[in-house]
Structure formats: structure tokens, C-alpha cells
Image: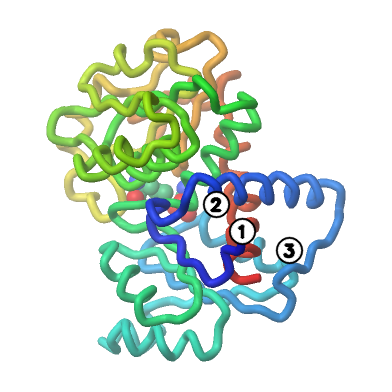
Amino acid sequence: MSLKGKDLLTLKDWSSEEIFQVLELAEKLKKENKEGTFHPLLKGKTLGMIFQKASTRTRISFEVAMWQLGGYALFLNPQDLQMGRGEPIKDTARVLARYLEGIMIRTFSHSEVEELAHYADIPVVNGLTDTYHPCQALADVLTIREHKGDFKGLKVAYLGDGNNVAHSLILACAKVGINVSAACPTGYEPDEEVVNWALKNRLVPDSEITVTSSPQEALNNADVVYTDVWASMGQEGEHKERLEIFKPFQLNQSLLKQAKSDAIVLHCLPAHREEEITDEVIEGPQSAVMDQAENRLHAQKAVLALVMG
Ligand code: CP
Ligand code: NVA
């Protein structure tokens, strides 16, 4: 199945088969990388990377991914682009498409990514918007498969804010057949539209996709426990107020004990210790967060090789 030319905007637009294809290639490329085998699948190709928000993992893993695939990654600071002075996205998109073979963009509004993808006739990869973080979710399911083997019957408990990371995690779990239960404070649940879409399009017809306000309910029988920051980029002004609201959802040792004893802990990072997760848990024996961060590289190499190759 050829994925050449395909955008990666939300994961809704990627079938289960396509996601499994990414996972298989990611595993192969990771193995080759560890063995020191060079795989120049994107020799001579260039990826432009636009960042409207800060990043450590996404920027570095995409840049290294292109290098390891024999291509080149160009960091584009919107402040230095004419875009920062008001040049329309549709012009930027069409111009970039004349120079590059792919664009990665991290921004605020998801509609900007959609507009970019509409006008650029090269693949556009969403590196995080206010609503979705598909590259993270691909690395997440890759990490779950590495640690747990088969997805069949697994349950992910997500604690905290029903944000971009939660949305993409729910979509990815639905697409690969993992049960997922999100525990969020009232008013901070994932978008109903995303949950309903996941329910309608899940790979396994009776897989669980639920939202609750009870961390205990989500954690019951969970194989994976996932959390993310309580105030995302752009919500800094709400940080203080959210600290109070989200307190009961902190992933600490006593909540973790309510999941299966061999559950792994995931966090997309950056983490705020003693807020959404305690230092004890993130540094503890069940934490797989560094494997998860590493897998951003391998999952994205697979995506890039498939869509730009
Ligand atoms: N998880 C993640 O996307 O990290 P960065 O914000 O550092 O890219
Ligand atoms: N939800 C977080 C994820 C950061 C990778 C944010 O959007 O800031």
C-alpha cells in the first residue's frame, strides 16, 4: 500500500492498515539504526519545519530523522518568514511546495494546518496543534507494542486534560484496537466529536472508548497509564486555576497502584513534576517515558519515508 504524498493531519485520515504499516516500518528502521545500518530512503529530499510553538522532542527528532534518512531538514522560524508579517498561508504553502518534498508544522489552530495541506501539493505532517498531536500518538502505540506485545485486550487509562494528546491517543487506540478510558475533570473532557468518531471508526467493534470523571474507574485493569500537562502551550494564563481543578487526577504512586501491577507509565513530555505526575512515578520502575520519547524518532522516520519516499 503506497502512502506517498499523503498528509498526516489527525490520524482520522489514516486507516488501521496504514498505521500498522507505519509501526512495522518504524520497528524495522529502529532495529537497523541500532545495528548501525544506514537507510538513505529520502536521499536528496528536504523537509521544511515550521514551529509556532516551542519544542524539544519534535524539532530534534524530525531533524535527526531526515538526517538519518539521507535527507535534509530546514528549521523555519515563522518570525523570520514573511508569514510572520502576514503573508497568507496559501501563498506560503504553494511557494514551499516548489522547493521542498514535505512540510512539518506545529501551530495553534488546527485549521491553519488544514489550509497549509490544502494548498501545498506535498505531504504536510502535523507536529502538534491545539487539537491533535498525531506523531506523538504513533510513537505512543509503538511504545505500547514494544512493551506489551500484541494490542489485543489491552487497556490504556488516560488521566487529566482532554487535550490534543488525549484526542490523538484516543484515535490511535481506536485504530489499533486498544481499549481506552479517559478520566478528566468535568468541563475538561476530550471533544465529544473526537470520542464519537473513535467509537464509530474503531478497529475492534466492542473495544472500550470511555470518558469518566473517576480516575479509579479509568485505572481499573489498565495496562498503560498515561498523563500529560494540565495547562498546554497557549493556556499558561489558566495554569494556577487548573492546578486546583486537576489535583485529584495527579498520577502518583497511590493512583498507579490501582492499575495492573505490570502497567507501564507514559507521558508525552515535557512533564511538570508534582503537578500531573510525581517524580517518584516518572522516575519509577514502571515508567517507559524515555523509550516513548525515543520512539518519536523511529515512528516519524517511518512516516516520512512512507509519505515523502
Ligand atoms: N512531546 C512533544 O511533542 O515534545 P516537544 O514539545 O518537546 O516537541
Ligand atoms: N498538551 C501539551 C503537549 C506538549 C507536547 C501541549 O500542547 O502543550
Image quarter in which the N terminus is found: bottom right
Image quarter in which the C terminus is found: bottom right
Q: Is residue 303 left or right of residue 186?
A: right
Residue at the (60%, 73%) spot, across then down: 73
Rendered location of residue 232, percent (x, y): 30, 47
* Mark 3: secondary structure: helix
Q: Is residue 277 left or right of residue 100?
A: left
Rendered location of residue 272, percent (x, y): 39, 36
Circle 2 residue: 18
Look at the image and tell me whether residue 280 can be seen: no
- N-terminal-most mark, 1 or 2: 1
Residue at the (47%, 32%) spot, across then down: 177
* Mark 2: secondary structure: helix
Q: Nearer the viewer, residue 297 or 124?
A: 124
Crowding at dot 3, Cα within 10 Å, few <14 / some 14-19 / many 20+, comes out as many
Give the residue type at disc 2: Glu
Give the residue type at disc 3: Gln
- N-terminal-most mark, 1 or 3: 1
Look at the image and tell me whether residue 152 can be seen: yes
Circle 3 residue: 68
Under 8 Å from ligand 1: the CB of mark 3? no
> Is 270 above or below relative to 216?
below
Circle 1 residue: 1
Under 8 Å from ligand 1: the CB of mark 2? no
Q: CA distance from mark 1 to mark 3?
A: 23 Å
Q: Is residue 16 left or right of residue 82?
A: right
Rendered location of residue 58, percent (x, y): 51, 57
Q: CA distance from mark 1 to mark 2?
A: 8 Å
Front: mark 1 or 3: 1
Give the residue type at disc 1: Met
* Mark 1: secondary structure: loop
Q: Quadrant of residue 42?
A: bottom right
